[in-house]
Image (spheres, helix red, strand yellow):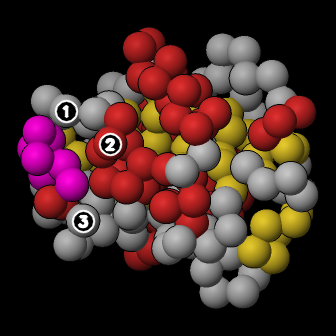
Amino acid sequence: MNTSYIFLANGFEEIEALTVVDVMRRAGMDVKTVSITDAHNVTGAHGVTVKADVLYERTDFITPEWLILPGGMPGAENLARFAPLNTLLQAQAQNGKIAAICAAPAVVLGPLRILDGKEATCYPGFEKALTQTTMRDTPVVALDRIITANGPSAALRFALAIVANSMGENISQEVGSGMLFYPRSMNFYF
């Protein structure tokens, strides 16, 4: 299994980023937090500072499994303005996997047209940026290579959907159960 990367920009939504890292690591997945700034310390939208594992400029993104985008404002806008990430996302969209939550599906993926012709969800009010996307009013939409979620309360479901996609529903159920999360199924299109 290849390394996955979750990108941190100042103003990121802390629960969306850290929940995903925690759940993926519980599942045994290799995931790295990546600062798109020139420093390892990145401060979230609610004042929580996180030390990223790696800096974008010093990381070689060869065949990543997942590229993951937390939301939060102005975090999602900061991700969208970072041209090297946009280039990486467009390349990943060809055959790789991308996950985005909250504002990130609309603010980051929308302008890149990565969600055109697909189903997705995002934070309420941002749907207007995704005119070529079939929007679903649901916490998580999990497609084969793209997973989107609508906001902080969906962070655990979003993370478990990523695990289910990569490692199977049984592992996702096991990790969720260990966290006292007991969904009836890991079908994340609800």
Q: Nearer the viewer, residue 173 or 120?
A: 120
Question: Which element carries disc 3, helix, strand or loop?
Answer: loop
Tag 2: amino acid: Pro
Q: Is residue 49 left or right of residue 4?
A: right
CA gap, disc 2 and disc 3: 12 Å
Would you name the residue on which mark 3 appears?
A: 126
In the picture of the structure, the residue carrying the numbered disc 1 is 116
At 44% across and 13% down in the image, what residue appears? Answer: 95
For label 2, the crowd category at 10 Å Cα-Cα, with few meaning under 14, some 14 to 19 and many 20 or more, is some
Magenta-colored span: 129-135
Going by the numbered disc 1, the residue's amino acid type is Asp
Q: Which element type, helix, strand or loop, lies under badge 1? A: loop
**Which residue is located at x 60 percent, y 46 percent?**
82
Location of mark 2 (residue): 111
Report the quarter where the N terminus lies: top right
Residues at circles 2 and 3 in contact by the CB criterion of under 8 Å: no
- State the residue at coordinates (65%, 23%): 64
Sequence order check, earlier mark of 2 and 3:
2
Q: In which quadrant will I find the C terminus?
A: bottom left
